[in-house]
Image (spheres, rainbow, N blue to C red):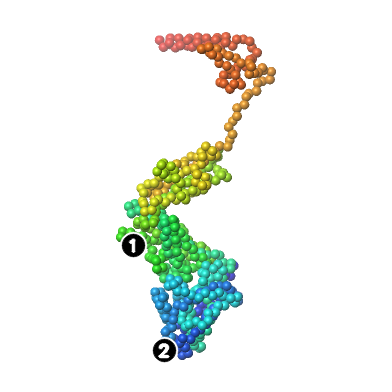
Amino acid sequence: MEKRTKRKNFLSSFLAILVMAVMLIGSMAQAVFADDYVAGKTGNINLTIQETGEDGTVKPIPNVNLTLYKVGSVTFDRNVHFVVDSALQFTGIDFENLKTADEWYKTADTLSAAVKKAGLSGSEMQSDANGKIVYSNMAEGVYLIVQSNPDDPNVSVSPMVLTVPFVEEGTGWTYDVQAYPKAVTRDGDKETKIQVTKRLYYINQDTFDVIEMEADDATYKVGLFLDDKGTIPFRSDYMKDIRLVKASSGTATWANVPDGKYYVFELDENGDPMTINDSIIIDEGKSYYYDVTDSNENATNEAEISQNGSTESVSYVNNYYSFIPTGFALKGHITINKKVLVDGQKTTVPDTFYAAVFETGADDSLNLVEGTIRELNQNGSVDIEVSFPENTEPESVTYTVMETDKDGNPVDHDSFAYEIDGEGDIILNESESYENSMDITNSKNTTPEPTVTNTPVPSGQPTVTPSERTSTPVPGGSTSTNNDGGGTTGRTSVKTGDNTPIGVWVGILAAAIVVGGAAGFAVKRKKKK
C-alpha cells in the first residue's frame, strides 16, 4: 500500500509542479510586456482540487476548505510588474526574482505564515463534488491559496501562489485563471505528527546545578520551519503558542505532516526565530538561553517524518534561566519506591495504595500539600512534584510522606490490613537539586497461628476431672491448687497404678548424687596435693 501511495503522490506532485511552472515562470520571471494587458480588469480564479492515481486516473477531492489571500498588486510602466503587499514587505519577497517552480512553492510557504503574522483576512470556500472552487470578479494582483485546516486528517493541500492575470506564451494575458493546487489524500497513510515540548529550568550560578522550575502563567511561542536558518515557515500554522499555568512543561503538536525534514525554533514576540544557545538579556544580570533536543536528549533541532521510518517526532525546547523570574517557582521531586510483601515474599495484590506529601503547620499539624496524592506502583516507583514559594531558593525543605486513602487522609494503622514501614520525614536539599527518594513497604502474613491441642490420654488410663483437685501446702498457710480447667500454671500428676511413694525414690536419688559429688571432690583435692 505504501508503494502505491508514494507513486500516486509523486505523480500528483509532478503534475502540479508542471502546471505551476507553466503558469508562473512564463508570466513572472521578469517584468512582462503589455500587448493585451487591460489595467483594472477583473478576472476569475478557478481551482480544481484533485489527485492523480498511479494509472493516470484523476480523482476530484470534495469538501476541502481553502482560503484565498490577496498578497500583491500590479504596477504598470509600459510593462506589468507584480509587487508584494506593503503589509508583507518584511518578508523580503520580490516576485520578479523568482525563477523556478520550487522557488514559488517556498515563497507560498513563507507567505502562508506571513499572512497570519500580518493579520491579513482571506476568503474561504469549500470544494464541491467535482473538487471545484471558483472565485469570481477578482481584482488584478497576486493571490495566495492555503488550506484552511492544515490538520485535516483526510487531505493535505500545499500552499500556492498565482496571479490575476497571468501571461501564457502564444496566448498573452489570461484573466480566466485555471489552477491545480498540489493535493494528497491520506487514505491508508499512517498518521504523522511532530510534537514540541517546552521545559523550564533554573541554573544556580554558584553550583551550576540545573533545577526544574514552573511558571504561574506564561506563554511561549515555538515554530516549525523548512530550513535550518528558520526563514521558510512550515505552512500557515508554523507558529504555535504553549501556555504554562502552574506548570513546568507544555506541548504543541503539528498533525498530518508530510514526509521530510523540519527545524524547530523558539520564537520571539514577533514570531521570529531566536538563535539557539545564544544568551538572551532580559535585564542587567538577568538572562536566559534555550536549546533544542530530541527524544533521546541529543542536541538537535531537526525533526524528521518518514512513512517508511518515524511517523512521529518529539522535540524539546529547553529554557535555562540565570535567575528566578517573577511568577516562577523552583520545584522538587520525591520518588517513592513501593514494595509489597505477603508472608515475607515480594508480590502484587489487588489492593490499591496511595501516598501524599504533607508539610508541618504553625501548630505542628500536618497539612496536605495540594496536588501530591499519588497512586503507588506496587514494586515500582512514582514521582511526586512539589513547588516551593515563588521567587525563593531555600537551602533545604522538609516534608512528611504518609500512606493515605485516595482522598489524601492518612490510613489508620490499627485497622489497616498491612503493616507500613518507611513513611515519615524527607528532606529536599538545594545541593541535591531538591531531589530525594524513600522506600515504603507494606507487609502482612496470611499463614494462620498454630493451635495448641490436648494430648489424648491412652486407653484404659484414668483421667482427672475438675473435681479431682490436689492442694499443696504453701508457706504462709495458703494453698496452690493444680487445676487443668482453671488455666493456671499448676500441673496435675497422672496416676500410674504404682502405689510406691514417689517421694522416697526422689530422696534416695538426691542422696546418691550428693554422696557421689562429695567423693569426686575429695579425689580431686587429693590429687592436687
| Residue at mark 1 | 281
Calculate the distance from the C-alpha at mark 2 to the C-alpha at mark 1: 51 Å
| Residue at mark 2 | 78
Tag 1's secondary structure?
Answer: strand
Residue ID at (50%, 86%): 174
**Residue 120 in view in this figure:** yes
Query: Which three-letter amino acid code belongs to the residue tagged 1?
Result: Ile
Location of residue 258 with respect to 139 vertically, above or below: above
Residue 322: x percent and y percent?
35, 57
Residue ID at (55%, 67%): 153
123 or 499, nearer to the observer: 123
Location of residue 401 with respect to 132 vertically, above or below: above
Q: Quadrant of the N terminus?
A: bottom right
Place residue 324 in its image quadrant.
bottom left
**Residue 294 in view in this figure:** no
Crowd tier of the residue under label 2, counting other residues whose Cα lies within 10 Å: few below 14, some 14–19, many 20 or above = few
Along the polypeptide, which appears first: circle 2 or circle 1? Answer: 2
Query: Which three-letter amino acid code belongs to the residue tagged 2?
Result: Arg
